[in-house]
Image: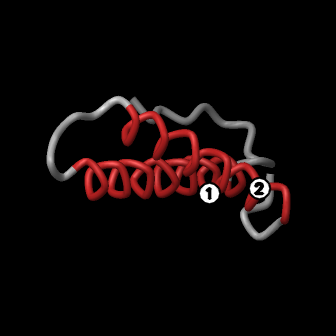
Amino acid sequence: MNIKSTRYLIIACITFVVLFLMNYIGNSADDKLERALMTAAAGVVGLTAGMWLVYRNRNDDTHQDLD
């Protein structure tokens, strides 16, 4: 999946909304908005990093040890 594609942007937006709502609705702390925004943004950053690694190595047949 190309990171610059419309399909990726839609998946990133859906990921942000789902993570934000899961953290905002299920949290009873005073700073639930800030926590939900930071968690959702971190989720999208993680998705972007993972998709960048997959896109970069899409034609490489060698085994990648990411663990």
In the image, taking residue 20 as reference, residue 31 lies left or right, namely left
Quadrant in the rendering for residue 2:
bottom right
- The residue identified by callout 1 is 52
Tag 1: amino acid: Trp
Q: Nearer the viewer, mark 2 or mark 1?
A: 2
Give the residue furthest to the bottom. 4
Which one is in front, 57 or 21? Answer: 21
Residue 43 image offset from top left, x and y in percent: 46, 47
Taking the spot 83% from the left edge, 65% from the top edge, the residue there is 5
Quadrant that contains the C terminus: top left
Q: Position of residue 64 (x, y in %)?
A: 55, 36
Q: What kind of element bears circle 2?
A: helix
Give left or right: position of 39 versus 35: right
| Residue that carries the numbered disc 2 in the rendered image | 10
Mark positioned earlier in the residue sequence (2 or 1): 2
Q: Marks 2/1: CA distance?
A: 16 Å
